[in-house]
């Protein structure tokens, strides 16, 4: 008999309760009763405790494990990039998700502030979500709810966000960013035709469309718009207020730059693994700057008089 | 039998498909075999649903296996690098190393399913072996929240392990 989900859930509940504190006599009896009530319960219990053994036996610390996994993730990211380029196969022109038909499932993914999320297991596309971003995905449509995503399509798809939409083919690579203040679209693999704010635009390869309230323009893609996919914030001669606007996307709370400090220029490559560190790096490079306010809530950078 | 005819009709196509992804004949052949092995296992466990569009089905299954392959390879390499930084006499036996790599692989699949906070709780409890109440104190949350996070994490473990069978 297949294990029902609820037997597993009950087993997990018991398992966690026993780990949290030692059971009272009455609880122990209740547990034994539950076990004996149904062979499916015993099987579920075995499966749950078995699923934990290998992890408790791992002779590494949490930090070592996470360190190893994140190193592995980084090298896999490079490999996956080259796979995506290889898998543009000419015979793969039919849209196989159509054959999959009704089983199209909606899926949601999101990255929290300061987090970047690799979605490499999806059939539709390999996707990296930047800080504070969310997508919704079904068989052949991707909806960027907010934030920023780097996407390499494996199939033909419809891409949309609150202010932008277009069609993408298998093998297409691009970055889309959409928030309340700005929409950006960077064409990475080829020339794209897109609709932004209800208007049609053609964006050449290695160019970025930037749509803001003040107007829409297309520029050669600045480095900092793509460097995040490698975990870096890479800028050259960027005004401080613009730099902090980028950086604050990775930090909780708001950071403002006072007009007196806004026109300092920043150049360099900073690791996004620790965005707070970038802020202190900037402050130590420019001793004339001060930082006031409440960390993680509201801060302001000013120039010493 | 369904799988026999699947194999005859689509095996060489699948190898071509995988070769396109991997650019290596030997690996493509291995993963094609693994794909059909998965199908046989599913059939043995009575979990094989009727397949209406074989190529789509095989593509999905094989792509998952290719991703697992890269995952394992990158984890193995990263682990060996970690190991190389430790004193030699501390190194586990080759069999133990394989177990550790396998466990890290499963761990990475589990963590992928979990939100950040739950990951943290799970690592502290299961890998670092901290008591729930100590985790609660360290993270400034209630024991009840630790319990809820652990329920989520353990469910994800069970899911990952039944998927990889």
Image: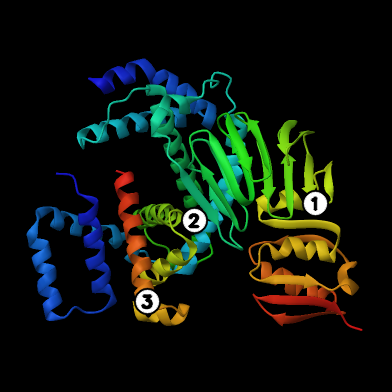
Q: Secondary structure at mark 3?
A: loop
Res A25 quadrant in image: bottom left
Task: State which chain disc 3 sits on.
Answer: B
> On the rendered structure, is A46 left or right of A240?
left
Q: Are marks 3 and 2 in contact (CB under 8 Å)?
A: no
Instruction: Please tell me how crowded label 3 is: few (under 14), some (14-19), or many (20+) other residues with Cα within 10 Å.
Output: some
Query: Which residue sits at x=85%, y=57%?
Result: A236
Q: How is the image coloured?
A: rainbow
Q: CA distance from mark 3 to mark 2?
A: 26 Å
Numbered tag placed on residue B130 in the rendering? 3
Query: Would residue A47 be visible to someone looking at this image?
Result: no
User: Residue beneath label 2, please?
Assistant: B80
Q: Quadrant of the C terminus of chain B?
A: top left
Q: CA distance from mark 3 to mark 1?
A: 51 Å
Q: Nearer the viewer, mark 3 or mark 2?
A: 3
Query: Which residue sits at x=78%, y=42%?
Result: A209
Give percent across and percent down for residue A122.
Answer: 49, 40
């Amino acid at each position: 008999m297949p294990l029902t989900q609820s037997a597993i859930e009950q087993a997990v509940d018991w398992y966690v309760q026993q780990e949290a504190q030692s059971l009272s006599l009455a609880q122990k009896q209740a547990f034994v009763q539950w076990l004996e009530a149904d062979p499916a319960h015993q099987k579920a219990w075995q499966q749950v405790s078995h699923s934990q053994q290998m992890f408790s036996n791992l002779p590494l610390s949490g930090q070592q494990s996470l360190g190893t996994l994140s190193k592995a993730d980084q090298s896999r990211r490079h490999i996956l990039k080259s796979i995506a380029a290889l898998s543009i196969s000419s015979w793969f022109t039919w849209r196989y998700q159509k054959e999959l038909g009704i089983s199209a499932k909606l899926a949601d993914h999101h990255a929290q502030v300061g987090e970047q999320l690799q979605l490499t297991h999806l059939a539709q596309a390999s996707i990296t979500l930047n800080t504070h971003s969310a997508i919704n995905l079904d068989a052949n449509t991707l909806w960027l709810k907010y934030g920023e995503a780097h996407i390499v399509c494996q199939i033909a798809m419809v891409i949309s966000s609150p202010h932008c939409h277009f069609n993408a083919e298998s093998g297409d690579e691009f970055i889309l960013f959409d928030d309340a203040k700005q929409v950006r679209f960077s064409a990475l693999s080829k020339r794209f035709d897109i609709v932004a704010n209800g208007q049609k635009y053609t964006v050449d390869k290695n160019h970025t469309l930037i749509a803001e309230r003040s107007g829409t323009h297309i520029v050669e893609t600045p480095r900092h718009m793509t460097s995040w996919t490698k975990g870096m914030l890479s800028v050259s001669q960027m005004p401080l207020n613009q730099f902090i606007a980028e950086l604050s996307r990775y930090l909780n709370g708001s950071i403002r730059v006072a007009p007196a400090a806004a026109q300092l220029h920043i150049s360099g490559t900073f690791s996004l693994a620790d965005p707070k560190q970038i802020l202190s790096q900037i402050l130590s490079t420019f001793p004339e700057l001060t930082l006031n306010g409440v960390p993680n809530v509201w801060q302001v950078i000013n120039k010493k008089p | 039998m369904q799988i026999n005819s699947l194999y005859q009709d689509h095996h060489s196509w699948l190898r071509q498909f995988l070769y396109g992804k991997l650019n290596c004949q030997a690996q493509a052949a291995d993963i094609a075999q693994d794909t059909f092995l998965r199908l046989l296992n599913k059939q043995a466990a009575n979990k094989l649903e009727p397949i209406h569009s074989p190529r789509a089905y095989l593509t999905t299954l094989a792509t998952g296996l290719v991703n697992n392959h890269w995952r394992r390879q990158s984890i193995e390499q990263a682990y060996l690098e970690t190991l190389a930084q430790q004193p030699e006499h501390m190194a586990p036996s080759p069999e133990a190393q394989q177990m550790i790599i396998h466990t890290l692989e499963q761990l990475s699949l589990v963590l992928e399913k979990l939100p950040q906070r739950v990951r943290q709780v799970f690592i502290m409890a299961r890998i670092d072996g901290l008591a729930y109440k100590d985790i609660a104190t360290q993270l400034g949350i209630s024991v009840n929240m630790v319990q809820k996070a652990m329920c989520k994490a353990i469910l994800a473990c069970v899911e990952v392990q039944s998927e990889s069978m």
